[in-house]
Amino acid sequence: MEIADLIKDLRNKTGAGFLDCKNALNQNNNNLDEAVEFLRKKGLAKASKKSTREANEGAIGIYSNEKITAILKINSETDFAAKGDKFLNFMDELGQLIIDTNNANLTKDEFLNLKLHDSLVSDYFKNMISQIGENLILNEMLIYETHNSFYSSYIHNSYRKNIGKIISLVEYSANNNNEEIKTLSKNLCMHVAAMKPESLDISDLNPKIIENEKKIQRELILNSGKPNNIIEKILEGKMNKFFSEVTLLNQNYILDQDKKVSDVLQSFNKSHKFEIISFNIVNL
């Protein structure tokens, strides 16, 4: 059997990285069974079993340079592992690698095939699974390209200044990104993290979500025995309440519950020029 086929078989049997398998075969005269035992003794053959376990904890990191901003979500099995320096350093290395590419179109598969520490990122994952002793999963990788806009972020339940359990991001345009605008954008990030809107405004909301909510509310109104001539009026009120809960601009602002977010922006724009372009929230 060719050495390439032996390495492939060994990786399938153990889940160990390419270089680890190549070394194991070299150390054991290309004997597959002895190479498996060699990797097991070193703890490198455990990754394949661990990689089938559920990973519902973890952390989310944010990384940026002048060209791109990236959000990385990696799951682990326990919160304990996610707080450890080994895991957090691992995240920071991966985050730095992403922004070093300066490629806003980088896919997850392309990223896993990049080189890091003389091996593929996918193999580095398997190596860290063996070292940490838990399954690790690259859950999300979001990359935003900076054009003429600005980004602000907020990290909730932080483990490091750029890593936590919840990260919200707001993209905005402004004529002058001064301290007042930066403060407002940061506060809006906090609002997004707390209120978790589904869209910016009603027009951005998925029509299927709107129709489904109308159907539910109309059924509830009909079952309550209300007269037919006021059903549509009641439905309008129910839907307005729904929109005020799920759309960012129509939500009550967390720092001033008497005002909607749109009211706050309208007042702010009397002396500034600020517009929300998009937002996102990533949580475990």
Image: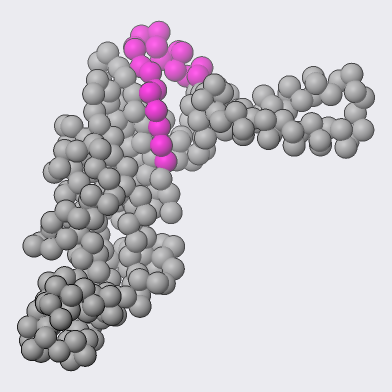
Q: Nearer the viewer, residue 108 or 28?
A: 28
- Depicted 118 relative to depicted 140: above or below: below
Q: Is residue 267 magenta?
A: yes
Percent of width and height locating residue 240: 67, 24
Which quadrant does the C terminus fall into?
Answer: bottom left
Q: Quadrant of residue 121?
A: bottom left
Q: Quadrant of residue 144?
A: top left
Residue under the image location 7 percent in, 83 percent down:
26
Residue found farthest to the front:
1
Which portion, as a residue range, is magenta? 262-281
Specify whether 227 is left or right of 95.
right
Percent of width and height locating residue 252: 56, 28
- Depicted 284 relative to depicted 21: above or below: above
- Depicted 57 relative to depicted 227: above or below: below
Q: Nearer the viewer, residue 264 or 65?
A: 65
Residue 192 visible, this angle = yes
Q: Is residue 44 magenta?
A: no
Percent of width and height locating residue 45: 25, 81
Specify whether 206 is left or right of 284.
right
Q: Quadrant of residue 85?
A: bottom left
Badge count? 0
Percent of width and height locating residue 233: 79, 19
Residue under the image location 81 percent in, 35 percent down:
219
Residue found farthest to the top:
270
Which quadrant does the N terminus fall into?
Answer: bottom left
Q: Nearer the viewer, residue 172 or 48?
A: 48
Residue under the image location 34 percent in, 23 percent down:
172
Specify whether 104 is left or right of 19.
right
Residue under the image location 24 percent in, 28 percent down:
146
- Depicted 232 relative to depicted 9: above or below: above
